[in-house]
Image (spheres, grey):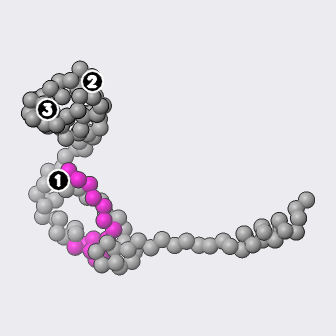
Amino acid sequence: MHSRLDRELRERIMGMASIVSVVVRDDIDGSPNAETVAFAFDGTNYEIDLAEKNRAKLVKEFAPYIGAARKVSLRRSRTASARRTTTRGQAAVRAWAKEQGLKVSDRGRISAEILQRYEAAR
């Protein structure tokens, strides 16, 4: 059996219900009703929230470049190549990096940048 205090507490909690509204604003001019637009440039992925007007401007500016560009398939992730490097392979990468004058530790993870440079040089 619930006490009067328990009942009053439940009633107060039930009366505290609230509605939360999320308004996404344009990252350029702050206008409401923006939607997230994702794009990539120079190997970096970006997201920006744009309302209709600024989205149209972006599409118009990108149109000539997109029209002249080639579509490419997704590249494998950097971590995928790092995971595939065996212990023996890591020794070869470390030796190559030292020959190139690159700073690389004798143990532990090899940076994605060094792995990419090694693969590009092969």
Residue drawn at point x = 19 percent, y = 41 percent: 113
In the foreground, 24 or 112: 112
Type of the residue with mark 2: Thr
In the foreground, 17 or 95: 95
Name the N-terminal-most of marks 3 and 2: 2
Is residue 21 inside the magenta stretch? no
Numbered tag placed on residue 42 in the rendering: 1
Q: Pinpoint residue 106: horizontal percent, then vertical percent.
A: 23, 28
Residue drawn at point x = 27 percent, y = 40 percent: 77
Farthest residue, direction top = 88
Numbered tag placed on residue 99 in the rendering: none
- Give neighbour class at mark 1: few <14, some 14-19, many 20+ (Cα, 10 Å): few
Q: Pinpoint residue 15: horizontal percent, then vertical percent.
A: 72, 74
* Cα–Cα gap, marks 1 and 2: 29 Å
* Cα–Cα gap, marks 3 and 2: 16 Å
Please state, as top left, top right, bottom left or bottom right, where the C terminus lies in the image.
top left
Is residue 46 inside the magenta stretch? yes
- Give neighbour class at mark 3: few <14, some 14-19, many 20+ (Cα, 10 Å): some
Which residues fall within the magenta stretch?
42-57
Q: Pinpoint residue 90: horizontal percent, then vertical percent.
A: 23, 26
SS at circle 2: loop
Name the N-terminal-most of marks 3 and 1: 1
Q: Is 50 left or right of 91, judged from the image as shown?
A: right
Q: Nearer the viewer, mark 1 or mark 2?
A: 2
Q: Pinpoint residue 61: horizontal percent, then vertical percent.
A: 16, 69
- Give neighbour class at mark 2: few <14, some 14-19, many 20+ (Cα, 10 Å): few
Numbered tag placed on residue 86 in the rendering: 2
Type of the residue with mark 3: Ala
